[in-house]
Image (cartoon, grey):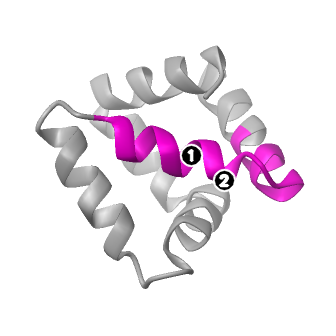
């Protein structure tokens, strides 16, 4: 995961209102769809639970995989730009 994405994750972690706003946005919905399409969200749920316990490795892996596709990378870039506003 690149430095910008890591910063984004930290910013959202510390600002629940901003995270809620993101998840209600079109890009947030697209992100959720991309992260859950393979297994109806089972891996995302496991990754979120691990991250809540202080182990973000699964979440980092999921985002890194997402960013391997042009659509995923573009989506994360748009989210980064929206969060910085």
What's the residue at 25%, 61% (across, down)?
A: 46
Number of marks in the rendered image: 2
Q: Secondary structure at mark 2?
A: helix
The N terminus - image quarter: top right
- Whether 40 is drawn above or below 7: the answer is below
Residue under pointer 1: 63
- Residue 27 in which image quadrant: bottom right
x and y percent of residue 7 in the render?
52, 17
Q: Secondary structure at mark 1?
A: helix
Q: Counting other residues with Cα less than 10 Å from the Cα at mark 2, is it few (<14), some (14-19), or many (20 or more)?
A: some
Magenta-highlighted residues: 56-76
Mark pair 2, 1: CA separation: 5 Å
Front in this rendered view, residue 13 or 18: 13
| Residue at the far right in the pictured view | 70
Magenta span: helix, strand or loop, mainly? helix
The C terminus - image quarter: top right
x and y percent of residue 81 in the render?
73, 28
Q: Which mark is residue 21?
A: none
- Whether 34 is drawn above or below 17: the answer is below
Residue under pointer 2: 66
Q: Counting other residues with Cα less than 10 Å from the Cα at mark 1, is it few (<14), some (14-19), or many (20 or more)?
A: many
Front in this rendered view, residue 34 or 43: 43
What's the residue at 58%, 58% (across, down)?
A: 25
Membership of 14 in magenta stretch: no
x and y percent of residue 32 in the render?
52, 66
x and y percent of residue 39 in the render?
45, 83
What's the residue at 33%, 38% (across, down)?
A: 17
| Residue at the far left in the pictured view | 53
Membership of 59 in magenta stretch: yes
Q: Are marks 2 and 1 in contact (CB under 8 Å)?
A: yes
């Amino acid at each position: 995961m690149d430095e910008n994405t890591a910063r984004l994750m930290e910013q959202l972690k510390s600002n629940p209102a901003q995270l809620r706003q993101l998840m209600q946005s079109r890009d947030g919905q697209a992100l959720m769809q991309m992260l859950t399409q393979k297994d109806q969200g089972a891996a995302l749920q496991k990754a979120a639970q691990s991250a809540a316990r202080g182990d973000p490795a699964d979440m980092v892996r999921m985002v890194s995989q997402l960013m391997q596709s042009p659509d995923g990378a573009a989506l994360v870039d748009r989210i980064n730009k929206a969060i910085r506003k």
